Amino acid sequence: MSIDRREFLAQSGACAAHLALAAGMMPAALRNAWAHTPNSAIVAREPFGNLERVADGVWALISTPLKGDQTTVANGGIISGRNGVLAIEGFQTPEGATWLAGKARQLTGKWPTHVALTHYHADHASGVSGYFTDSDHPKVESTSRTIQLVLEKKPDDPRTGALKDAVVLSATDSTLLDIGGRGVRVIPRSGHTESDISLELDEPSVVFCGDLFWNGMFPNFVDAVPTQLNASVRAIRRAKDTIYVPGHGAVGRASDYDRYVAMLGEVEQAARRALVAGMTAAEAGNAFTLPPSLGEWTLFSKQFFPRAFDAWFKELK
């Protein structure tokens, strides 16, 4: 589904607009390669993304919006149990949610019984009504603040009406979602927004990180509280071998995740130095570059750095 660029930017919210701006500046070869994950089996391929089997009964939708199709924009996924199926994220459009639900039925025999939203940004939540049909009414689960923020942003939008009967998750304690022989821990976090969650499996070890992790991509700090973001990102990291599904970018392993942690550390150190030096956030961001030791970042663009420095300056001051 391709929509008008102006309409997309107006509807999409912070993260999707961030991606749309990057797409125009990014070489075509990188736009096509940024979500490549050679170690995962692709079970479905669409212009807007690839559905990859990352473990037994676990699939990750890796969206590829930089190719021009914004049906989903954000990553998401499917987790299957004996008695239920959890779909992760509501996506940019209802068509994206309906597509993922259809794939869940093909792969598991069930339409999603549960839907989880990792945070309120439009590319993760606006299409949630696509999971609902005349006969299918999954439980939508998220924190009260996420639900409140979605409804505040689009109170009369039929795409978000499904959230009015959502199941409210604890904002302070983890919730165990039992879908039959498989428990998914839903853990409240913060940093990318004031109300994030991660969805975590212990065996196999898989974490759906939402936008707390952007793999190989410089993240959007528009609603970030940087110290909380850094703390949440570090808390998600596991000692054992783990598959990390980011909010944007390819499926990651430990080395990818650690590179992201190191990148956030570089931004923090630079922001602290710049503040002491009396620079403005814009000056510091425009002067900032990531060290070559961190490798190439697919959405590397200096215009995204001032936003990160602005978030740091607001908190440090």
Image: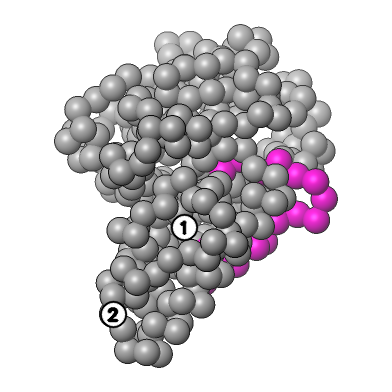
Residue 154: x, y in percent? Answer: 26, 40
Q: Callout 2, which amino acid?
A: Thr
What element does badge 1 sit on?
loop
Q: Which mark is residue 192?
A: 1
* Quarter of the image where the N terminus is located: top left
Name which residue lies at 45% across and 54% down. 218
Residue 297: x, y in percent? Answer: 49, 50
* Residue 155 against residue 48 in the figure, above or below: below
Q: Give the crowd class for mark 2: few <14, some 14-19, many >=20 residues within 10 Å.
A: some
Q: Is residue 100 left or right of residue 245?
A: left
Q: Is residue 133 left or right of residue 77?
A: left
* Residue 97 against residue 228 in the figure, above or below: above
Name the residue tied to disc 2. Answer: 280
* Residue 78 against residue 204 in the figure, above or below: above
Point out the residue furthest to the left here. 6
Q: Magenta region: which residues? A: 227-246
Quarter-wise, where is residue 203 in the image?
Answer: top right
Q: Between residue 34 and residue 62, name the one nearer to us.
A: 34
Q: Is residue 11 left or right of residue 38?
A: left
- Asked if residue 17 is among those painted magenta in the image, a careful observer would answer no
Regarding residue 183, the answer to whether it shows in the image is: yes
